[in-house]
Image (spheres, rainbow, N blue to C red):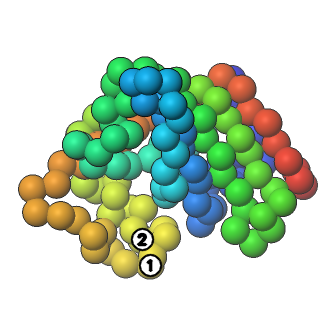
């Protein structure tokens, strides 16, 4: 499913998103993340060993909710599937996200031995609120 201009604008902006994955017992697990897009996919960055990557490798179904930080009644809520998880380019990507969200050149919260992963999600449904 193609992302609308409004959804892309929210994903490209300095807006936080909530990613919901499924635990092994089916319970939802939600995390607030920085988000990105290539115009078609929702993209975010996390670290190996965390709950999100484990859940997404077991069950690729996810939900993403992003809202406009300046106008919280504008949002895009997407359901979709993880199409790729890669470590390639993940360090550069988290630095790009740190620049977008914090205005710094390098991600300041990196832990010793941390291995970053880029997650790519293909939205299958998109619900918009407050579209301009």
> Is 115 rendered above or below residue 79?
below
Tell me where residue 88 appears, x and y as whole percent. Answer: 23, 40
Depth check, front residue: 35 or 114: 114
From this view, report whether residue 124 is shown above or below residue 90.
above
State the image quarter where residue 77 is shown: top right
State the mark number for residue 103. Answer: 1
Crowding near the residue tagged with mark 2, few <14, some 14–19, many ≥20 C-alpha atoms within 10 Å: some
Which residue: 84% across, 60% down? 73
Determine which of the numbered discs, if any, sits on residue 132 in the image: none
Q: CA distance from mark 1 to mark 2?
A: 4 Å
**Left or right: where does residue 53 sit relative to residue 30?**
left
In which quadrant of the rendered view does residue 79 lie?
top right
Q: Is residue 57 left or right of residue 41?
A: left
Q: Which residue is mark 2?
A: 99
**Looking at the image, can residue 40 be seen?**
no
The quarter of the picture where the N terminus appears is top right
**Residue 13 percent location from the top left of the image:** 63, 62
Q: Is residue 60 visible?
A: yes
Name the image quarter holding residue 112. bottom left
Q: Which residue appears at 59% of the width and 26% of the height?
A: 80
- Crowding around mark 1 (Cα neighbors within 10 Å: few <14, some 14 to 19, many 20+) is few
Check whether the beta carbons of the residues at disc 1 and disc 2 lie within 8 A of each other.
Answer: yes
Residue at 44% from the left image edge and 24% from the top image edge: 25
The spot of residue 57 in percent (x, y) is 34, 25
SS of the residue under disc 1: loop
Left or right of residue 39: residue 129 = right
């Amino acid at each position: 499913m193609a992302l609308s201009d409004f959804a892309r604008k929210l994903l490209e902006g300095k807006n936080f998103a909530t990613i919901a994955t499924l635990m092994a017992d089916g319970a939802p697990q939600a995390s607030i993340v920085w988000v990105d897009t290539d115009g078609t996919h929702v993209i975010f960055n996390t670290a190996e060993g965390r709950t999100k990557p484990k859940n997404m490798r077991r069950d690729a179904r996810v939900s993403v909710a992003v809202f406009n930080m300046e106008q919280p009644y504008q949002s895009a809520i997407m359901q979709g599937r993880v199409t790729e998880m890669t470590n390639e380019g993940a360090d550069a990507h988290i630095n790009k996200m740190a620049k977008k969200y914090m205005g710094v050149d390098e991600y300041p919260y990196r832990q010793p031995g941390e291995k970053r992963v880029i997650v790519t999600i293909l939205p299958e449904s998109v619900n918009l609120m407050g579209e301009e």
